[in-house]
Amino acid sequence: MKRRILLVDDDLAVLLTLKAVLELHGFEVETAASTAEAFSRLESGVYHMVISDLRMETEEAGLEVIRVARRQSYEPATALLTAYPPDGEHWSEEHSDSLLVKPLGTSDLVRQVEALLVRRADQQQRRQRDASAAAQEATRKVG
């Protein structure tokens, strides 16, 4: 099964370049050129990862895309893409799982995306194991 990525950027050249790079490395990529388009795609699709440019219609439009992505039941990995990295006070993993700084080389992009997807899968498996163990413990206490 191909891993699905939603890529959001209002710069068409960046959007198409990153899409081509990710597809060449085996990812299925859907694109959105605005926050509104991203919201629509998030409602209708399921993605393993969401990558959004930080500055689009507003200075922090990408943060809103990431917030909406993080509320999805399928819990995608998230990354903000920017040419203008904020200082540590304005960005943390509370905002997204990673900050990708442009310009970004092909190998760096693919390596970081792969690492984020592995980390997210590990987190999801750990939560499932913990939930299963808690359910078994509750069943033992009742029985």
Image (cartoon, rainbow, N blue to C red):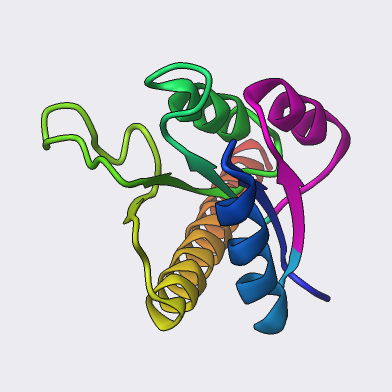
User: Residue at point 40% right, 40% down?
Assistant: 96
Residue 136 seen:
no
Q: Residue 31: percent from the left, percent from the top?
A: 73, 47
The C terminus: image quadrant: top right
The quarter of the displayed image where residue 20 is located = bottom right
Task: Count the numbered circles shown.
Answer: 0
The quarter of the displayed image where residue 129 is located = bottom right
User: Residue 61 vs residue 10: left or right?
Assistant: left
The quarter of the displayed image where residue 71 is located = top right
User: Residue 7 vs residue 40: left or right?
Assistant: left
Q: Residue 5: percent from the left, percent from the top?
A: 68, 57
User: Residue at point 72% right, 25% down?
Assistant: 39
Magenta region includes residue 39: yes
User: Residue 52 vs residue 5: left or right?
Assistant: left
Q: Residue 10: percent from the left, percent from the top?
A: 59, 36
Of residues 122 and 137, the one nearer the viewer is 122
Q: Residue 107: percent from the left, percent from the top?
A: 43, 83
User: Residue at point 26% right, 40% down?
Assistant: 84
Of residues 106 and 26, the one nearer the viewer is 106
Is 28 above or below relative to 108? above
User: Residue at point 38% right, 75% down?
Assistant: 105
Residue farthest along the top direction in this orientation: 58
Residue 94 seen:
yes
- Magenta extent: 29-47
The N terminus: image quadrant: bottom right
Of residues 141 and 62, the one nearer the viewer is 62
Magenta region includes residue 45: yes
